[in-house]
Image: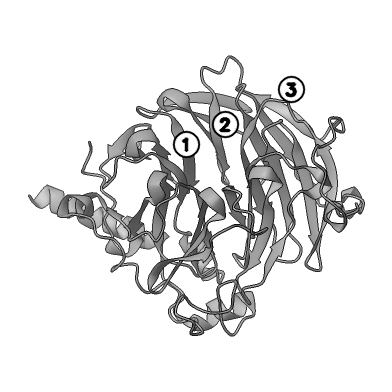
Amino acid sequence: MIDRLERSLRDARGWLGRIELPESDEKDDASCDRAATRPADGSTSDGEPRSDGDPTGGAASSVGAGSSDDAATGWELADSPASKTLYDVVHGQDGPYACGEGGLLLHRGDDGWRVLLERGPGVAENTLRAIGATDDGCRLWFAGDSGALGCYDVADGHLSDYSAPMEKTSTWEAIAVTGKTDSERVRVANGSGEVLECIVEDGCPTWGAVVEPGGGSTITGLTAGPDGFYAVDTSGGAYLETRSDDSSERPSPSSDPRDGTPADTEPTDTSPTDEWQRIGVDNAQVNFQDVWADEASVFIAGADGIAYRYDPHCENWTPLSVGQGDLQSIRSIGSDAVAVASGGRLYERDQSVRWLARETPTEQSLFGLALARSSADVDAGLATAPVDVAVGAGGVIIERDRRSGSSGRDAGR
């Protein structure tokens, strides 16, 4: 009993060392230069303006209705306002945002989860499959079916529709964003293996060339890392576009196809690229679903419970046996790494090379995952709800409150 208590205390100190709450609301407000945060229509669901309130989301401990067994491992079922599938989730400055079927965009505020958009940026009910945030968390970009593409400004609730850029109307499968609001760099990829470059200057996007990093296989994952943008596809390919800070390499302005009637078909030719380089994975055993990069490693989530870890310094790939089911998303912060899979499965890496299965309060497949920001991010002013979030089929949302200090390391499935 004493040994277990000591382990629990060590775990609690470890989580609290990584996740710290901001000291006040002022840091959060200043970061986005806002006086209030509103939904896209400028009001709450009951028509009243929503104040900033607690920048940590306030309701983290009250949202969710998991059982006592769920609490033992930290993951609890949240009260979801959606019954449609949610495909992706990301932390914004004022809490997590999730996107999904029919153009849904959800936000977790101080009173729980609510619907911001019901029909997507173009009011066309095109499913949104990927979402990303600027480094300061003040702008969200999301993309999906039929070329749906848009962004949402946290500070003033401003929504912008950029659907079908460069006359691309096929499904966007993945998106990656890096940089601060109004100067971010965006990459969005589709089912034809194409990647579209976007540079934002003074709040307005400029579209670059459409390129094919691989041979045209569906690109299922994009991420922005310290070295540049990473992409993975369904043919076991991994690609890197090396980061460049040279302003001369920014894309030339392109006309906005939305000024006229969007094309029913899209160009079949793409520009060749020397910027994207294939970096793996030799003899890949499975299709890839997602990619994530942090300061130390790059992780790929694949089918059959297999992941790959890339060491950029040694340019080496290592396969990892994570568990069962097709891994759909993988995230890491420091030494923490989590993956979600079909059938409600969730895995967490312990302090060694092992991945442990964690109890979850759902059997619905999980598709999207977002981990709470690190204490360093919070210290830099990136306040957000201190929760890990996973979303999936049937609108399911599960959360783990980092403030509880429970990592669930002693509980496996």
Residue type, numbered disc 2? Tyr
Q: Which residue lies furthest to the left in this view?
A: 1
Q: What element carries label 1?
A: strand
Q: Mark 1 points at which residue?
A: 328
User: Residue 332's x, y, as percent?
Assistant: 48, 45
Q: From what the image shows, is residue 36 above or below residue 22? A: below
Labels 1 and 2: the sequence-earlier one: 2
Q: How far apart are marks 2 and 3 (CA)?
A: 21 Å
User: Residue 299's x, y, as percent?
Assistant: 53, 36
Q: Mark 3 points at which residue?
A: 215
Q: Distance between the residues labelled 3 and 1?
A: 22 Å
Labelled disc at residue 235: none
Labels 2 and 3: the sequence-earlier one: 3
Disc nearest the viewer among 1 and 2: 1
User: Residue 235's x, y, as percent?
Assistant: 62, 21
Q: For mark 3, does the 10 Å Cα neighbourhood hold few (<14), some (14 to 19), or many (20 or more) residues? A: few
Residue at 59 percent across and 64 percent down: it is 137
Q: Name the residue under label 2.
A: 310
User: Residue 359's x, y, as percent?
Assistant: 25, 43
Q: What element carries label 2?
A: strand
Compared across the picture, whether 140 is left or right of 52 comes to: right
Q: Residue furthest top?
A: 283
